[in-house]
Image: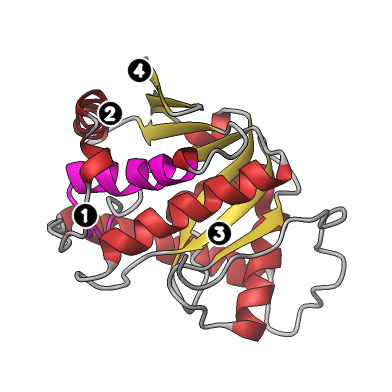
Amino acid sequence: MSKFESSIGNCPVSISIGNMVREKAGAYLIPQFDSEVVFGGVAGAVARAGAMRGMEEFADYMDKNGPLPFGTIWPTRAGGGNSDWLINAISVKSGDDTAFDVIRDVTYKAMKLCGDEGVGKIIFPALGTGILRELTDEQSAKAMLSGIDKYASEGGNPVAASFVFLDGSGAQSLFDAYKTVIETKAYASAGTEVAAGKIDFNRWARGMDADAAANQEYARNHPAGTPTEGIKVGKPLQLKPKTGRS
């Protein structure tokens, strides 16, 4: 498995090709739309790997309180799988002019939340590069790594940031882009950029079909009116959602 390790300030940073849900961490970051929870993509993989109760808790919150502002992060207990927490980040399809900044923003907020609450490791997907691709691989790397750089520059508690790219089409390109941005420290001077990602419509169609099937399966198992009491897992400790811009 390809793996590269480095650091940004006092925060260890690693990139690898594999499957994030097979790796243990204090938290997973999950990209979300602003108005609905889709049980496909990263969210679906995490749910199927044991964290369905955590996803249900966020879906329940979204049903009652959505839409949420872009840049919001909302933590829930995972309830199973290989992470303790799910940090839901409202970041998908915010718009070409804002996607880069929103993705940097939620990365920073997730790192700060983990640092403040003693969560030692968070696993990230490459935000903005999914089936609705908004950013190029390089833009995703610069946006996310500059969010980590902002957190590290503030001198917070060390948090290990691990990027795991799903093995398959596009993973090596992401790995190479992130590695280059880390080695050249291009993240340190990153400003605002207009999203320049291009959608692969064949991949998009396959992904939409997979997401539709996942949503239908969820709906079959959770018909309208199903009580939601009891889906919360454990106590919330002191983790609090972060909203708006920093």
Magenta stretch secondary structure, dominant: helix
At label 4, the amino acid type is: Phe
Q: Which mark is residue 182?
A: 2
Residue topped by disc 4: 4
- The reply to whether the magenta stretch includes residue 132 is yes
Assess whether mark 1 and mark 2 are in contact (beta carbons under 8 angstroms): no
Count residues near mark 2 (Cα–Cα under 10 Å), then give few for <14, some for 14-19, many for 20+: many
Question: Residue 23, how many percent across, how many down?
Answer: 57, 28
At label 1, the amino acid type is: Gly
CA distance separating discs 2 and 4: 10 Å
Residue topped by disc 1: 191
Q: Residue at x 45, y 69 (%)?
A: 245
CA distance separating discs 2 and 1: 16 Å
Task: Say what secondary structure mark 1 lies in.
Answer: loop
Q: Does residue 134 show up?
A: yes
Residue topped by disc 3: 88
Q: Residue at x 63, y 44 (%)?
A: 114
Question: Residue 83, how many percent across, how many down?
Answer: 66, 38
Task: Identify whether 229 is placed above or below 163.
Answer: below
Q: Pick the residue in front: 197 or 121.
A: 121
Colour scheme of this structure image?
A: secondary structure
At label 2, the amino acid type is: Ile
